[in-house]
Image (spheres, rainbow, N blue to C red):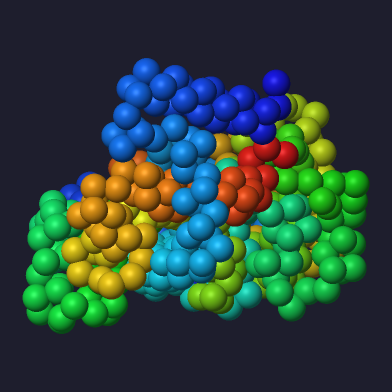
């Protein structure tokens, strides 16, 4: 489980985030929605511990994975090396199996520049799940992908999340993506941004069913 | 046309131009023709003199190059990574970058003595600022997203340096090494000219005093040929291997 309690975060004298409190249970997938520039990625980086300049407390597990908006791969190493270098405890057969799960079995020896953006995103996803993370953070993982590629990525991500059950926090500006993946959505709005809506989709679906 | 053929044709054209100039000049004591160098070259090679002096110079080049690259790399990486260090050390870097090699050589000989330590130190000190400047730019250009990724996945420091930092710095290291080698061997000849009793620079000094253009050219061109061989057989293939992923 992760617990986030951000009192304030700013850049210089500009306040960005204020009074953001939420928790994510084990296996739960939470989407952070909001318009561009509101501070969603900033919030994600605070949760990841990549930015320590804020007022508040974030409690997170040690085993973490981050799927960045850009694939953020080692361009000078092959697909399989991109997994093995970051996860040295993993064996090569296990890394190949992970690449197979994301549909890159034929691409293990390719360099990232030899792969399409969709394939690079899959590799980034494989690297994330290879370490069996307790917390998975995704920053607009389907951005810039065409419709069918994004749809395939969403299906793949959902399958992997259900298999490995990490606590998942992902940033998106698309309600469709949030609906497809998330158990709960947090909507950020305002300046500085705060949580204006915290909606449990599972509860909503249960109410609808009854 | 393959690169090797172009090189050979270019060198042959250079030799032909030299022949022409030498025959137009007519005075072998001023400009000997390439053929005039062959017998003296074979004599020096056969007697072991050429090898002895070439080895002395090569060892000094290797020592100075190794020290300059290691110290320059470390300094550049620290200055490019930590702005505080950069602010303090930058004025020193500018001073040493602009300090003439001749001044450094003379001071090292005066302070340390006419020794190989002084010679190598002078050359290394001359080149360290240049290497540090190039590596500093590389360190400043390191991808912050890759650093963030390494942090999230708790990548070990040695792994980070080996697989994240060094590959990004490879073009800068290659550039610093290339320009470093080109400058270092020339400065080594100067330190030998001024204060050593062996080496190519010493031999050039000796034959300069004897006004022997032929022997000056024999020793100079022998060393240039060696440096060209290092460039074509070692440096360029190494550079191609480092860049292989870009051509994939």
Image-based side of A48 in relation to A72, left or right: left
At 48% from the left and 35% from the top, the residue drawn is B34
Of residues A198 and A210, the one nearer the viewer is A198
Depicted A55 relative to depicted A176: above or below: below
Percent coordinates x, y for residue B61 in the rendering: 39, 64
Q: What is the total number of numbered labels drawn onto the structure image?
A: 0
Q: Is residue A204 visible?
A: no
Q: Is residue A89 visible?
A: yes
Q: Residue at x 15, y 81 (%)?
A: B112
Q: Position of residue A87 (x, y in %)?
A: 70, 71
In this view, the residue in front, A80 or B59, is B59
Please determine whether, in this image, residue B236 is positioned above or below residue A174: below
Query: Residue at position x 14%, y 64% from top?
Result: B104
**Residue B217 lies in what quarter of the image?**
top left
Quarter occupied by the N terminus of chain A:
bottom right
Q: Is residue A5 left or right of residue A210?
A: left
- Left/right placement of residue B50 relative to residue A125 reads left
Q: Nearer the viewer, residue B64 or B88?
A: B64
Q: Is residue A14 above or below residue B78?
A: above
Residue at position x 11%, y 66% in the image: B106
Q: Position of residue B63 (x, y in %)?
A: 39, 72
A123 displayed left or right of B116: right
Please identify the quarter of the rendering in which residue B158 is found.
bottom right
Vertical side of B128 occupied by B17: above or below = above
Q: Position of residue A100 (x, y in %)?
A: 89, 54
């Amino acid at each position: 489980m992760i617990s986030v309690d951000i009192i304030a975060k700013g850049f210089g004298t500009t306040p960005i985030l204020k009074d953001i409190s939420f928790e994510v249970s084990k296996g739960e997938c939470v989407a952070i929605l909001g318009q561009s520039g509101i501070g969603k990625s900033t919030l994600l980086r605070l949760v990841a511990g990549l930015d320590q300049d804020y007022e508040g407390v974030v409690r997170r597990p040690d085993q973490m994975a981050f799927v960045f908006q850009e694939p953020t791969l080692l361009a000078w190493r092959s697909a399989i090396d991109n997994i093995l270098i970051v996860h040295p405890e993993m064996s090569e057969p296990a890394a190949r199996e992970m690449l197979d799960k994301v549909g890159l079995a034929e691409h293990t020896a390719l360099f990232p520049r030899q792969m399409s953006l969709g394939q690079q995103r899959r590799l980034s996803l494989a690297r994330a799940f290879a370490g069996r993370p307790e917390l998975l953070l995704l920053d607009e993982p389907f951005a810039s992908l065409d419709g069918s590629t994004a749809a395939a990525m969403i299906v793949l991500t959902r399958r992997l999340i259900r298999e490995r059950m990490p606590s998942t926090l992902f940033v998106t500006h698309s309600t469709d993506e949030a609906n497809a993946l998330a158990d709960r959505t947090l909507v950020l709005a305002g300046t500085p941004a705060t949580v204006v809506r915290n909606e449990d989709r599972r509860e909503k679906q249960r109410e609808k069913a009854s | 046309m393959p690169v090797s053929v172009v090189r050979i044709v270019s060198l042959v054209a250079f030799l032909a131009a030299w022949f022409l100039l030498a025959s137009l000049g007519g005075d072998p004591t001023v400009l000997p023709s390439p053929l005039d160098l062959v017998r003296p070259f074979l004599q020096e090679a056969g007697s072991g003199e050429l090898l002895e002096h070439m080895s002395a110079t090569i060892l000094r080049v290797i020592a100075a190059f190794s020290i300059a690259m290691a110290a320059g790399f470390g300094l550049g990486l620290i200055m490019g990574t930590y702005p505080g260090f950069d602010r303090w050390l930058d004025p020193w870097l500018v001073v040493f970058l602009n300090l003439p090699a001749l001044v450094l050589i003379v001071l090292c000989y005066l302070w340390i003595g006419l020794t190989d330590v002084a010679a190598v130190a002078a050359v290394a000190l001359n080149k360290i600022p240049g290497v540090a400047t190039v590596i500093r730019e590389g360190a400043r250009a390191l991808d912050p997203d890759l650093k963030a990724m390494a942090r999230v996945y708790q990548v070990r420091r040695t792994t980070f340096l080996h697989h994240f930092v060094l590959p990004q710095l490879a073009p800068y290291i290659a550039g610093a090494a290339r320009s470093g080698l080109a400058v270092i061997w020339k400065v080594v000849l100067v330190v030998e000219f001024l204060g050593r009793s062996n080496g190519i620079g010493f031999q050039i000094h000796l034959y300069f005093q004897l006004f022997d253009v032929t022997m000056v050219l024999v020793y100079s061109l022998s060393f240039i040929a060696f440096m060209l061989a290092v460039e074509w057989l070692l440096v360029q293939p190494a550079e191609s291997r480092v860049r292989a992923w870009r051509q994939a």
